[in-house]
Amino acid sequence: MNEVGIDSASSLHTSESVGEVPVLRPVSVRAKCSSNVQSTPEIEKKYVHGVYDAIAPHFSSTRFAKWPKVSAFLNSLSPGSLILDAGCGNGKYLGLNPDCFFIGCDISAALINICTDRGHEVLVADAVNLPYRTGYGDAAISIAVLHHLSTEDRRRKAVEELVRVVKKGGSVLITVWAREQEDRSLIEKWTPLNQRYVEEWIGPGSPRVRNPSSPRILESIPEAEENGAGERLKDRHANSSKVKLDEVMNSISLDEGNSSAPTGSEKGYAEQQEYFVPWHLPYHRAEVSGASAVALASGLAKKDDKKGSVVYNRYYHVFSEGELERLVSGLDNAILVDRFYDKSNWCIILEKTS
């Protein structure tokens, strides 16, 4: 597939090289999108984009298992369908159904390089500004992407984009990390945003913080996809988590003195949704392209000599039960056709109606 359907409102692209592989970057934005939603907050630039660019080869080496429910969705599509993967990572789902056509995009040029080396049709693009014509694809997927967007407006815009780029009758599958993890002990290894950062939040749903105690070293954790299978989602309401992030990153710092997590009955722990999740990059892989040296010098990453690794922290907004459904409830051109809990993820399937 040699031609990508580009929306006329964002049709200008520039070709540049990342390493030895040329990639396409959109250079204009969609006029109908408000600037505050389109403008990437610094927390995402540093703790999502920058981190994945630095850890891409190691991250990719751990991403090969396909989730059964995602595979079932892709294999259920009609032969000849065009599937758009927004946030494709290393491309593990691209080409999964040999009877369909796939186009992937990701904000990380380093991950897109890996996809290109594997022969996939991909480009660098932002999830809140997809560079495809309206109604271009037959289906779209967003697997473990929305939880890296730091405001509710940006998460909602990403959903709107997924619906926009598929045809009427087309399907959209979205999965996000759940706050209700099957293995609750995993959350003890994540770092809640600290009090100084909490004060930069506006509106309800502000994260709570664990009380500081003796410091401890962050431990590596398995990704959510490595957890056991989950259960079907039950219908019930949860607290709204509409939030807004201040983009002044000088006020962001990690809570160096986390204690072990309190029990789930404690209100602060139960309501926490904003975390830094560690990624341990082994020393022998840490100097690929020199990214880790720069990250260490700038304070974005830290050394853990005990584990022989450079520790990066990735920003996550983990979704509470019912939150993903509320996020899509205002759509006037799509309906919710399925929802489920799988491998510590909340998942939904939408159908475009107009």
Image: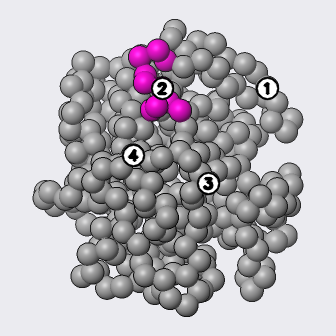
Sequence-earlier tag: 4 or 1: 1
Residue that numbered label 1 is attached to:
16
The residues bearing labels 4 and 1 have C-alpha atoms spaced at a distance of: 33 Å
Residue that numbered label 2 is attached to:
35
* Residue at (36% x, 43% y) in the render: 152
The residues bearing labels 1 and 2 have C-alpha atoms spaced at a distance of: 25 Å
Question: On the picture, is 181 further left or further right than 197?
Answer: left
Residue that numbered label 3 is attached to:
250
Q: Pointer 2: residues within 10 angstroms few (<14), some, or many (20+)? A: few
The span picked out in magenta is 30-39
Is 64 magenta? The answer is no
* Nearer to us in this view, 353 or 219: 219
Sequence-earlier tag: 1 or 2: 1
Sequence-earlier tag: 3 or 4: 4
For the residue marked with disc 3, what is the amino acid?
Asn
The residues bearing labels 3 and 4 have C-alpha atoms spaced at a distance of: 17 Å
**Disc 4 vs disc 1: which is toward the camera?**
4
95, above or below 38, in the image: below
The residues bearing labels 2 and 4 have C-alpha atoms spaced at a distance of: 14 Å
252, above or below 17, in the image: below
Q: Position of residue 293 (x, y in %)?
A: 84, 60
Residue that numbered label 4 is attached to:
244
* Residue at (66% x, 64% y) in the render: 312
For the residue marked with disc 2, what is the amino acid?
Ser
**Disc 3 vs disc 1: which is toward the camera?**
3
Q: Position of residue 239 (x, y in %)?
A: 21, 58
For the residue marked with disc 1, what is the amino acid?
Glu
194, above or below 95, in the image: below
